[in-house]
Structures are given as structure tokens and as C-alpha cells.
Image (tube, rainbow, N blue to C red):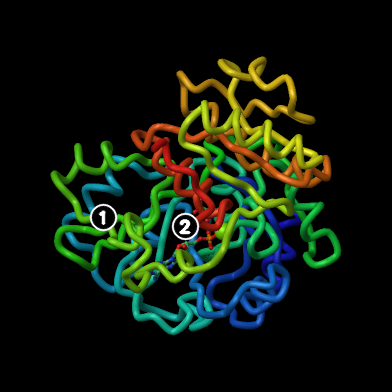
Amino acid sequence: MEAADLLKKEEVVAFPTETVYGLGANAYSSEAVQKIYEAKGRPSDNPLIIHIAEEAMLAEVAAVIPESAKKLIERFWPGPLTVVLPKKGPLSPLVTAGLDTVGIRMPNHPIALALIKLAGVPLAAPSANRSGKPSPTQGRHVVHDLKDRIAGVVDAGPTGVGVESTVVDCTTNPVTLLRPGGITLEELEDTLGPIRVDPHLEKNTAVPRSPGMKYTHYAPNAPLVLVESFEKLEKLLKQAKEEGKVVGILTTEERQSFYKEADYVLSCGRRAELATVASHLYDCLRQFDQLNVDLILSEAFPVKGVGEAIMNRLQKAAGGNTVKAD
Ligand code: TXA
Ligand code: MG
């Protein structure tokens, strides 16, 4: 594969995973990893996830593998779960942004796995978007954001899960959920019993353990307001139209015929099946940029199952601009 040759020459290449497209580089080469930060415009204090293709690679990058991590790996790898472990070996210090821990996952995607094996090294790979933008779930999203900034993209169509991996810190006991994602809290607790949820995920007070949690993320160009009641959403729509704004609505199939006054109504899936919403969420957020709306009003979703990850991303896209039900 040409992409593997580029990786061997310290270049950065975007590739599909089951969650979102990643921007890969040899995790042992600071020259290569530096190019990731440059291409994304990413602050260098936000560490990257290491992608491996076989469990033998784990012992090369992790100093200790606690029992909790073993259980999670056994059940969820390959898959959308990143475990944070004490780091070891010749990893570029740029990967971990100076931390003594490293986030590691084995993606469940044949192309990602083949590429890592051909490259012969673990790949550092954040999502392949410009920093702050929604993660790419299609090859064309990567091209849009990074076309002239990277050596290539392996385009294999839409990714599937649509939101990033769940990040779990396995250096604490019990383990700590740092970022909700493709593996749900319910699935984690079914494997390990009750776990800790990083307080920063619930309130905005504590210092974030996962550096990525402190940045504005997933934001479309227009302001997005996350509205937790359908009635209030309809009122806000009416008001914005009276003010002459071009308004986009983010909804689902169940309610897409309800917003007659809106300029654009995008359905991201079926409320009754939240995995379909996760899968199309970022593409919808990106479509609003093409439509040049002045304001996006988004429905809210139940915070259970993959709904926790969906709401986490929408809250970040809204930058705290959430209208409560009462
Ligand atoms: O699904 C995914 O995880 C995608 C695909 C490409 O694999 N990757 C991804 O990477 O979302 P990125 O860089 O966009 O997000 C990595 C997250 C950030 O929130 C970062 O702060 C956290 O993982 N992270 C990485 N290493 C960490 C560490 N040692 N301790 C705590 N958090 C860490
Ligand atoms: Mg990202």
C-alpha cells in the first residue's frame, strides 16, 4: 500500500477507522508526529492516541497493563475504546504531550489494521480534521480540511460509528471515564462494575484529566444552540425568523416535518435508534457550513447509551449555549 510507504518516510496519511478518519504518523518519530500537529493546527499540549494492530504491540508502548485494562481489551478490542496506561518505550514525547501515560486503541477496521501492520509501527492518530472542527466521517471531509497539508488520504467511504472512541483512564482504581464514545458507560460498567466518571464531564469546574476536553470542539461556523425542549425550540425558531436569520434545524426523521418556518432542516438519523444519529452527526454539522446558515438550533438527545457521546459532542459544538427544558 502506497500509504504505508509514505508513513515509512515520516509523512502523515489519513485513514479510515470504525469511528472517524484518523491522521496517522509513525508514533516513534518526532519528525512525523510534529507534522500531525502542524497539519491540524492542534495545540501541542493535547496528546494523541496510539493505534495498534495486534496485542503484541501493546507491550511495546505500555509499561503496566492492569487487570481492569485486560478485561476491557478482551471484550472491546478491536473496537472504539481507548485505554490510558503508563507509557513505555521509544514513543515520541510529542505523542503524549509530556504526560507519563499514553492512550492506546486497536481500531476495528480492516484498512486501519492492514495499514498499521504494513507500516510495522504503532501509529499516532488524532481525528483527521482541522483542530476545533467536527471530526471527519467521510474521506471528503478530510480532503476539505487538510487537502494541501498532508501526504494522502485512504478513502474508504463513511466510517460507521461516527463518534470517536471512548477514552478510559486505567491508571486509576476504579477506572475513570474521560471521554464518552462508541463504547457506552453501560457496557463499561457491565464489564467492570461501577466506574468513576471524570467530574469535568458532568460539571465544567474540575481541571480536565483528558487535555482534549478543555478545547472548543466540533464547532460549525454558525452558532449552535442545543435546545432540550421541542416547544422551546419551536419558539426560538419563530423568534429567529422574525429577526430575519437564516436558520438550520438539526433533528431526526421522527420530527423533520415539524419545522416549516426553518430554512434548512437536516435529519441526522432516527431518535429511536441513537446509533444512526451518532453515525451522521458530524456530516450534518459540516453540511450547515456549506448552507451558510446564521443560526443552528439542535434538538437534544437522551443521555444514555451512545446518547451520552452525542450530547457531549453537541454540548461542545454549542460551546455551553444550551437551553434547558425548564
Ligand atoms: O476514535 C478515535 O479515538 C479517533 C480515531 C482516529 O481513532 N481518534 C481521536 O483522537 O479522536 P483525538 O486526538 O482527536 O482525541 C484523543 C483524545 C483527546 O481528548 C485526548 O486529550 C485524549 O484522547 N488523550 C490522549 N492521550 C491521553 C492521555 N495520555 N491521558 C488522557 N487523555 C488522553
Ligand atoms: Mg479530535
Between 109 and 290, the one lying in front of the other is 290
Q: Which residue is mark 2?
A: 52
Q: Residues within 10 Å of mark 2 (few under 14, many from 20)?
A: many
Q: With 144 as the anchor, is 324 left or right in this view?
A: left
Residue 193 occupies which quadrant of the picture? top left
Residue 217 occupies which quadrant of the picture? bottom right
Query: Image quadrant for the C terminus?
Result: top left
Name the secondary structure under disc 1: strand
Q: With 62 as the anchor, is 66 left or right in this view?
A: left
Between 125 and 133, the one lying in front of the other is 133
**What amino acid type is highlighted by mark number 2?**
Ile
In this rendering, the label closer to the viewer, 2 or 1? 1
Q: With 141 as the anchor, is 99 left or right in this view?
A: left
Check the image and report above or below for 235 versus 189: above
Q: Which residue is mark 1?
A: 197
Q: At 66% from the left edge and 57% from the top edge, which residue is drawn?
A: 133
First in sequence: mark 2 vs mark 1: 2
Q: At 79% from the left edge and 43% from the top edge, which residue is drawn?
A: 293
- In percent of width and height, residue 310 lies at 48, 41
**What amino acid type is highlighted by mark number 1?**
Val
Name the secondary structure under disc 2: loop
Q: At 80% from the left edge and 39% from the top edge, which residue is drawn?
A: 246
- In percent of width and height, residue 207 lies at 35, 73
Q: At 56% from the left edge and 15% from the top edge, which residue is drawn?
A: 254
- In percent of width and height, residue 101 lies at 35, 74
CA distance separating discs 2 and 1: 26 Å
- In percent of width and height, residue 17 lies at 57, 45
Q: Residues within 10 Å of mark 1 (few under 14, many from 20)?
A: some
Disc 2 to disc 1: CB gap under 8 Å: no
Between 42 and 101, the one lying in front of the other is 42
Residue 146 in view: yes
